[in-house]
Amino acid sequence: MDKKEILIGTIILFGLVSFSFCLFSGASAGWSFNLIESIGNEGFRDLFLGPGQRFSLESPDFLLVEKNSLTSVAPPTTFTPQVFGALVGGYETEDVKKIIVEYEVEEGDSLWGIADKFGITLETLLWANDLNKGSTIKPGQKLIIPPVSGVIHHVKAGDTISEIAQKYKASIDEIKTFNELSSEDDIFVGDILIIPNGVMPQVSSPQYAPQWVPLADSYFICPITAPCRITQGLHWYNAIDFSHGNCGEPIYAAAGGQILKVKLTNSTSRWANGGAGNYLTILHPNGVVTMYGHIATSFVNPGDNVLQGDRIALMGGQPGTAGAGKSTGCHLHFGVSGARNPFAK
């Protein structure tokens, strides 16, 4: 190739790059909103957030709110890297490494067979589901499956890693490593920890026997805009799903309290943050903790105080987007720790 051909090729390449830059940067606000009008809000949202999007998932720094306005989205950052119990059903051998799964019993299943299928001890399966060796199971019944042999622990006020390790005769280092804890203090009320090789104390009360705080009917409000539409009933862990089918809708604090955790991720993996994807938790004055999963972005930070009804996040969950986690569509996973979920029927 001679110098003339190289020069022509360079000029053409420069022209294409310049044109692309102008085209995709939306050189003026008028161009941007003309595009929205020409393809419609739904089409615009799908262009950036749909499963077959033409642009990189990391590119947009804004999100459609209720399909009629734009809001900026802060770049995802990871906070407090605890493992959170997965909010999933099903089993995938390559992905499920540190994830609690919810398994639906099939015809012909036995407790021993299920434990063997998932590579855990029978005792681990029994402890996780408050069962004993004489318990019977039936098709359609849902069982909690820990990712490794050991114990599932729900963190309560005053818990420490050292005390938890001693209680279950487990290793502090194994607990920290498996749950990706930065230090022994890196746990919060409402967290769900995996205790590898832990042993349930014989004198202990059942692991999942609820010690629930009684709540007035009006203590929680629906965390999404009216109508309060439930799309999935009670599932692991003590959670209800809400959705109108649209990402970008506001999410509200169901009750007042303090923000405990805000955990966001750049990952598009379905198993990000234990399947919950982006999520935040709120500690309420009565000790109850609420969890808001599959959010698109957060408007709050750890330590913030919020009032009931405050806008705290935007709904996410679009499969394939960063922080969607194990989600099949735009929705809010609303979990309650320490009390009955008031939206469970």
Image: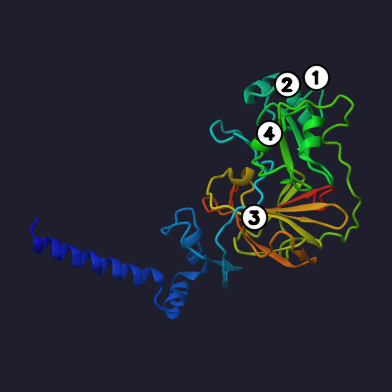
Q: Quadrant of residue 201?
A: top right
Q: CA distance from mark 4 to mark 3?
A: 36 Å
The spot of residue 13 in percent (x, y) is: 23, 64
Q: Report x, y in % for residue 231.
A: 69, 52
Foreground disc of the pair 2, 4:
4
Residue at left offset 56%, top offset 30% = 93
Q: Residue at x 90, y 49 (%)?
A: 213
Question: Label 3 belongs to which residue?
Answer: 331
Q: Earlier in the sequence, mark 2 or mark 1?
A: 2
Q: Which residue is mark 4?
A: 173
What residue type is disc 4 on? Asp
**As drawn, is 307 to the left or to the right of 28?**
right
The amino acid marked with disc number 1 is Lys
Distance, label 3 to label 1, CA atoms, is 38 Å
Q: Earlier in the sequence, mark 2 or mark 4?
A: 2
What is the number of the mark on residue 122? Answer: 2
Frontmost residue, 198 versus 315: 198
Earlier in the chain: of badge 4 and badge 3, it is 4
How crowded is the residue under tag 3: few (<14 C-alpha within 10 Å), some, or many (20+)? many
Q: Give the percent coordinates (x, y) of residue 97.
A: 59, 34
Amino acid tagged 3: His
Label 4 or label 3, whichever lies nearer to me, is: 4
CA distance for labels 2 and 1: 8 Å
- Residue lying at 42% horizontally and 59% vertically, measured from the top left: 55
Q: CA distance from mark 3 to mark 2?
A: 35 Å
Of the numbered discs 3 and 1, the one sitting upstream in the chain is 1
| Residue of label 1 | 133
In this view, the residue in front, 65 or 180, is: 180
The reply to whether callout 2 and callout 1 are in contact (CB within 8 Å) is: yes
Q: Residues within 10 Å of mark 2 (few under 14, many from 20)?
A: some
Q: Residue 209 got which mark?
A: none
